[in-house]
Image (cartoon, rainbow, N blue to C red):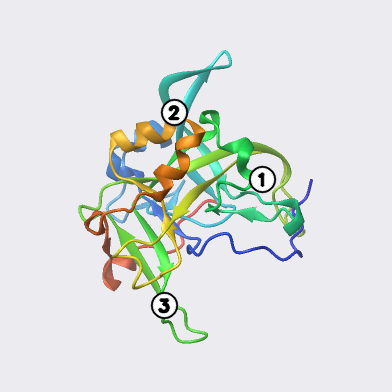
Amino acid sequence: MRWRTGSRSPKFSGMCNRYAADIRKAGKERDYWGFDEWSETRINPVLGNTVLEVFPKSQAPIIRSRWIDGKRTDQFEWQTMRWGLPGPPQFGAMPVTNIRNVKSPHWRSVLAVAHRCLVPFTAFSEYEDASPKGKKQIRWFAPPDRSVAYFAGLYRVWSGDYGSKKEPNEGDHVLFAFLTTDANELVRPVHAKAMPVVLTNHVACEEWLNAPSEEIEAIQARVLPADALEIVGDEEAAQYVGGYFK
């Protein structure tokens, strides 16, 4: 199967499709990358800029339950996945990065516990609703202590061409997306339509990974406290530039 890149894609959520995942802040770089030595310039020949940005269809570090002999265990493991699950066929099956309508029959197959994952992030972005036409202003949101938090993710294996007409990428791909919800008091003045479902502690992460499918809407409906995130200043936000895996 090939993505129909000429088809019109519906607006499933209003979130800006860009976030940062600096897993060094969780002390997880050795677990994921296999090493933990970084230069003073924060540049590594394998990664490029180690403040990893994630864009649609690019690779990202994801945490999921470990499976042994076809059985899900209580252990976790890292896996590289690509951002964007196949959308509804009536819209050309274009990749969908954010899922809002969990009642849609299209998403029913990925709501089960077997498809849950955690998407680590250190900041995410939204465009300002009040941006001048043709000059969209991007704003970044991050935990106040600049630690790692998580999006409530869903993943599946998909077979086909996940590339482009110019650069085909045929094969089996592990793809993910994450849930969005109503914008909270911090995000709403910047971007009113939606924001990601954010998990800020281990209890929330465990709940997401194990809750029955019928409880997903309740988890999604919770309003994130305004003080769980803060708006990143322009100078600090300048670090989020170009370090990503295609």
- Alpha-carbon span between mark 1 and mark 3: 33 Å
**86 relative position to 116: left or right:** right
Quickly name the residue at label 2: 77
| Proximity of marks 2 and 1: CB atoms separated by less than 8 Å | no
Quickly name the residue at label 3: 137
Residue type beneath disc 1: His
Residue type beneath disc 2: Glu
Query: What residue is shown at x 72% (from left), y 66% (from top)?
Result: 8
Indicate the quadrant containing the N terminus: top left, top right, bottom left or bottom right: top right
Q: Nearer the viewer, residue 211 or 73?
A: 211
Residue type beneath disc 3: Gln
Please tell me whether residue 110 is drawn above or below residue 38 in the rendered image: above
Of the residues tagged 1 and 3, which is closer to the observer?
1
Earlier along the polypeptide chain: callout 2 or callout 1? 2
- Alpha-carbon span between mark 2 and mark 1: 27 Å
Q: Nearer the viewer, residue 205 or 43?
A: 205
